[in-house]
């Protein structure tokens, strides 16, 4: 069975004015377009394109299909998303039960746990450059970055706070400093760091951190006086090229900066924020679940499992993402582990399953309920499906 689906773009303020429109080959709407959701998540279920306009969750229930364990998105960032981390499954279950018992309405602005699930996520770049802040940089590197900035008192205070105390390791130092900054007690640090990044005496060319400083300067300009600037300064900058991917497991801080990508995540809405947002930030709860270990960003290398078929395996049971470079000469045939969604991103893609056939153009998708799927035509498509349990 094939079910063509579509959805409207969500107009979050951080969205791009042009990227999704360019992918779909249409004029921009005139407002930011941040995400298009492909799935049955109740927050914005896709519509079934059969003339009925039914939401996908209802259509799947009608044919006896359980809710999808994943959510597929087109994501287009024009400015930084909020810095955020997601809980593990155990943390989510505990937090959800706690807020339920406390009677916090599920639609309340201060509600943190909307469900009992974790929310690992992977994103593959569609634009030629996709920038993101992901995970925490080793402290020695952050100290070098700070030493390249003009020596304002707040910058010096931050550098001093990042020095190890007694037997603290890097993770403990970062946990302490992040809690201090986000508590609102470090306004001089925030102000002086912003001034050091944006002032006339800032010199990126000789710092060795030109790319990082350019991103941080833009954040400082877009989010004045936001303590998330300090958290962003502690994070790894990743620049993905088209087709490259990164993974954000439980507890890892991340904030996409700019670019277009295909994102796949577990079907959850649990987000704990750490700055660069007007939304609610619960500092104690964030610090309880955040992973302050340091190291390189978690990049996922694609594995070519067949000619023109690339698997991005994040090692989670909720989802698996495959990219197909379709050609008329060689149709890609794939076994499926459960209900799948095929999303076209370039060209004209032909999808066949169970005797049904649908043609997709960029930005359109179809649900596949079958044991396998064949993808041909001439273009690129992404296939989301449950992971291997």
Image (cartoon, rainbow, N blue to C red):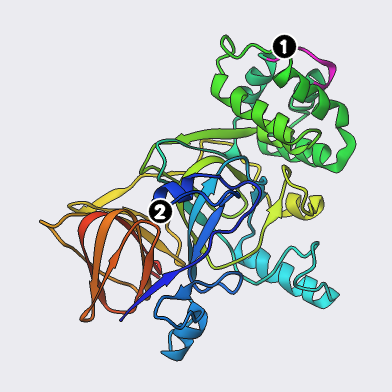
Residue 40 place in picture, x, y as percent = 51, 74
Label 2 environment density (alpha carbons within 10 Å; few <14, some 14–19, many ≥20): some
Secondary element at image label 1:
loop
Side of 255 relative to 364 (left or right): right
Between discs 2 and 1, the one toward the N terminus: 2
Q: Quadrant of the C terminus?
A: bottom left
Secondary element at image label 2:
helix
Q: Residue at x 40, y 66 (%)?
A: 387
Magenta-span inclusion, residue 267? no
The secondary structure that dominates the magenta segment is loop
Query: Residue 9 versus residue 161: which sits nearer the camera?
Result: 9
Q: In the rendered image, which residue does mark 2 sit on? A: 24
Specify whether residue 168 is in view: no
Query: Residue 261 versus residue 85: which sits nearer the camera?
Result: 261
Q: Residue 240's mark?
A: none
Q: Quadrant of residue 256?
A: top right
Query: Residue reaching furthest left?
Result: 329
Relative to residue 43, is residue 17 depicted above or below? above
Give the magenta-colored segment's residue range. 149-154
Residue 108 place in picture, x, y as percent = 80, 67
Residue 193 place in picture, x, y as percent = 76, 24
Q: Residue at x 55, y 33 (%)?
A: 237
Q: Residue 200's mark?
A: 1
Query: Residue 176 versus residue 85: which sits nearer the camera?
Result: 85
Q: Cβ–Cβ below 8 Å for labels 2 and 1?
A: no
Specify whether residue 42 is in view: yes
Q: Residue at x 64, y 72 (%)?
A: 116
Residue 34 place in picture, x, y as percent = 56, 52
Label 1 environment density (alpha carbons within 10 Å; few <14, some 14–19, many ≥20): few
């Amino acid at each position: 069975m094939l079910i063509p689906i579509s959805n409207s773009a969500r107009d979050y303020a951080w969205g791009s004015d042009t990227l999704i429109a360019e992918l779909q080959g249409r004029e921009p709407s005139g407002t930011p377009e941040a995400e298009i959701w492909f799935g049955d998540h109740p927050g914005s279920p896709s519509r079934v394109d059969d003339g009925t306009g039914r939401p996908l969750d209802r259509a799947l229930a009608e044919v006896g299909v359980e809710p999808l364990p994943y959510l597929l998105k087109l994501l287009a960032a024009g400015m930084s998303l909020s810095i955020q981390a997601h809980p593990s499954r155990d943390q989510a279950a505990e937090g959800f039960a706690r807020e339920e018992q406390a009677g916090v309405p599920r639609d309340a602005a201060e509600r943190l746990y909307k469900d009992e699930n974790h929310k690992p996520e992977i994103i593959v770049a569609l634009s030629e450059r996709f920038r993101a802040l992901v995970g925490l940089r080793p402290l020695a590197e952050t100290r070098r970055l700070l030493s390249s900035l003009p020596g304002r008192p707040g910058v010096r205070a931050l550098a001093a706070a990042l020095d190890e105390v007694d037997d603290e390791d890097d993770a403990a130092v970062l946990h302490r400093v992040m809690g201090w900054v986000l508590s609102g007690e470090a306004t001089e640090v925030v102000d002086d760091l912003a001034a050091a990044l944006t002032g006339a005496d800032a010199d990126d060319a000789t710092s060795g951190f030109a790319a990082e400083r350019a991103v941080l300067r833009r954040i400082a300009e877009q989010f004045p006086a936001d303590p998330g600037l300090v958290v962003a300064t502690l994070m790894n900058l990743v620049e993905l090229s088209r087709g490259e991917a990164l993974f954000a497991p439980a507890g890892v801080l991340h904030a996409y900066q700019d670019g277009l990508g295909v994102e796949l995540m577990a079907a959850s809405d649990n987000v704990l924020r750490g700055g660069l947002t007007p939304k609610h930030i619960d500092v104690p709860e964030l610090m309880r679940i955040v992973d302050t270990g340091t190291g390189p960003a978690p990049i996922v290398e694609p594995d070519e499992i067949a000619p023109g078929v690339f698997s991005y395996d994040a090692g989670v049971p909720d989802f698996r993402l495959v990219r197909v470079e379709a050609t008329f000469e060689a149709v890609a045939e794939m076994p499926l582990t459960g209900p799948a969604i095929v999303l076209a991103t370039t060209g004209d893609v032909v999808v066949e399953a169970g005797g049904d056939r649908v043609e997709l153009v960029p930005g359109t998708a179809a649900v596949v309920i079958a044991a396998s799927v064949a993808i041909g035509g001439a273009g690129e498509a992404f296939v989301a499906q449950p992971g291997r349990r």
